[in-house]
Amino acid sequence: MNRYNADADDFYVNVNLNTEMELPNGRDTVLHFFEQMRKGFPELRDFQAQENGDLVLESDKEQDFFRSVAIEPRRLVSGCTNPESLADAYRQHDLVLDLAPHLLSISLLDCEALDVSFGFDFTYDGNHDEVVAEALGVGSAFEGLLEVPRARKVVNFEPSLTIALDESCQLQARLSIETRTSAYQVRTGEFGDDQISLYLKVRQYWGNGPDMSFLESFRRQREIGEMLLQESIIPRVVRPLAQVIASR
């Protein structure tokens, strides 16, 4: 098992290449790109042209381990869920970013931003926002709200923080938590078997730079992401959240 799966029900590593211009969607271009991806990863064999215009190649969704590649109007997406190792996910993303410039005509000039995302899903049948508040705390500035006489239950708490990683603010990291509990569920006590999601996104805006290829930027961004996960996010966010869920 991937060590990042130890505390969550699902773990995934995704890459999004966001473009200024629309990506090509011609039959020959798209199929040739997907054929090259399938040669590298034979499990990618389910092709779909969706109603919204997205073109998707993916593996069997019924399996715990899942790969997908999608060409959207202005975004190229590569996703890997529950990989055996980070290296296995990175191999897929490396191939996508290696093929994209010449097979899909994506140049450095056309790039808006490159995103490298690490995600954790926690299945919990209960008040997601209450669990997040208990695990992470709401901060001293907000604690008083929970102590006022009219306060009953937390119904929305989705903390998010973005930090700049360089002086130009073109390299950023964003940590966010998404809950899926409604006020109706809190009021009735009828909760669905939904997931709390935690995302770490390392984004490189292109603009006037950087002076590197997509692959070079991806490798730098994933190293930053791993460092943030290991030194801060897993011990201070992921594990406390998993422990509160396990105790209920």
Image: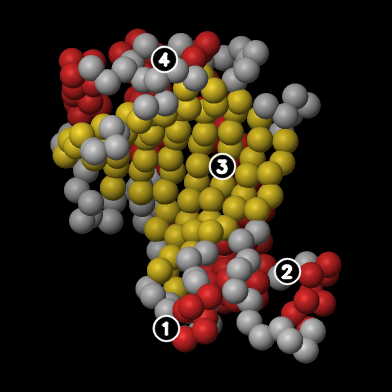
> In which quarter of the view is residue 33 placed?
top left
| Distance Cα–Cα, label 1 vs label 2 | 25 Å
Among numbered discs 1 and 3, the one appearing first in the sequence: 1
Residues tagged 4 and 2 counted as in contact (Cβ below 8 A): no
Kindly identify the residue that appears in the image at 23 percent across and 17 percent down.
Answer: 26
> In screen coordinates, is 207 left or right of 146?
left
Residue 27 in the image: above or below residue 219: above
Among numbered discs 3 and 4, the one appearing first in the sequence: 4
Q: Which residue is mark 4?
A: 106
| Distance Cα–Cα, label 3 vs label 4 | 22 Å
Q: Nearer the viewer, mark 1 or mark 3?
A: 1
Q: Which residue is mark 3?
A: 201
> In screen coordinates, is 88 left or right of 59?
right
Q: Which residue is mark 1?
A: 190
Kindly identify the residue that appears in the image at 48 percent across and 66 percent down.
Answer: 180
Pointer 2 local density, CA inside 10 Å: few below 14, some 14–19, many at least 20? some
Q: Is residue 70 visible?
A: yes
Kindly identify the residue that appears in the image at 29 percent across and 37 percent down.
Answer: 52
x, y percent for residue 156: 61, 68
Q: Nearer the viewer, mark 3 or mark 4?
A: 4
Pointer 3 local density, CA inside 10 Å: few below 14, some 14–19, many at least 20? many
Q: Nearer the viewer, residue 9 or 100?
A: 100
Disc 1 is placed on an element classified as: loop
Residue 134 in the image: above or below residue 163: below
> In screen coordinates, is 193 left or right of 150?
left
| Distance Cα–Cα, label 1 vs label 4 | 48 Å
| Tag 3: amino acid | Lys
Pointer 1 local density, CA inside 10 Å: few below 14, some 14–19, many at least 20? few
